[in-house]
């Protein structure tokens, strides 16, 4: 039995182009600073948030709800930062 607590945040992809390479790189840059794994998932699949390719495999379009998970409570500020950039549409056009 795993003896760790997973902490999470849920948000929605807001930018017109969804999760593509640039947003995935922004998330990975933050996730690489975590002390333990950060995950991003769509309810059925989850990807390592420090891997651009892994995140792109989720194929998240605009309007897609994603869950962010941290394995270490110390990484919650990083999780909140990732949620913040998603909530702001990665600084991209939100309308397409």
Image: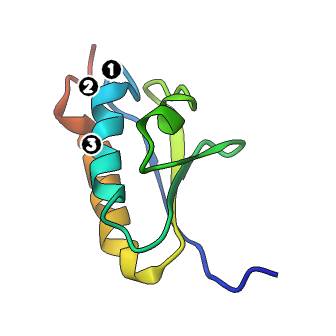
Asked if residue 72 lies left or right of residue 94, the reply is right
Alpha carbon separation for disc pair 2 and 1? 5 Å
For the residue carrying disc 1, how many other residues have a C-alpha within 10 Å: few (<14), some (14-19), or many (20+)?
Answer: some
Q: Is residue 71 above or below residue 4?
A: above
For the residue carrying disc 2, how many other residues have a C-alpha within 10 Å: few (<14), some (14-19), or many (20+)?
Answer: some
Percent position (x, y) of residue 34? 37, 68
Helix, strand or loop for disc 3 = helix
Which callout, 2 or 1, points at the residue further toward the start of the chain? 1
Which of these two is toward me, 91 or 53? 53
Tag 3 and tag 2, C-beta contact below 8 Å: no
Percent position (x, y) of residue 25? 30, 38
Query: What residue is at 33 percent from the left and 47 percent from the top?
Result: 27
Asked if residue 35 lies left or right of residue 94, the reply is right
Label 3, on which residue?
26
Alpha carbon separation for disc pair 3 and 2? 17 Å
Q: Quadrant of the N terminus?
A: bottom right
Query: What residue is at 47 percent from the left and 24 percent from the top?
Result: 61
Q: Is residue 59 above or below residue 1?
A: above
Tag 2 and tag 1, C-beta contact below 8 Å: yes
Most distant residue in the bottom direction: 3
> How was this image coloured?
rainbow
Query: What residue is at 59 percent from the left and 73 percent from the top?
Result: 6
Label 1, on which residue?
16
Alpha carbon separation for disc pair 1 and 3? 16 Å
Which of these two is toward me, 72 or 86? 72
Which callout, 3 or 2, points at the residue further toward the start of the chain? 3
Q: Give the number of the disc on residue 94.
A: 2
Percent position (x, y) of residue 85? 26, 47
Q: Quadrant of the C terminus?
A: top left
Percent position (x, y) of residue 24? 36, 36
Q: Is residue 19 above or below residue 26?
A: above
């Amino acid at each position: 039995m795993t003896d760790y607590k997973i902490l999470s945040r849920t948000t929605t992809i807001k930018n017109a182009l969804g999760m593509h390479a640039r947003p995935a790189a922004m998330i990975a840059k933050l996730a690489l600073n975590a002390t333990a794994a950060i995950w991003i998932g769509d309810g059925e699949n989850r990807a390592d948030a420090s891997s651009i390719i892994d995140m792109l495999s989720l194929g998240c379009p605009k309007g897609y709800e994603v869950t962010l998970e941290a394995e270490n409570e110390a990484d919650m500020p990083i999780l909140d930062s990732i949620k913040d950039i998603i909530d702001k549409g990665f600084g991209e056009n939100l309308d397409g």
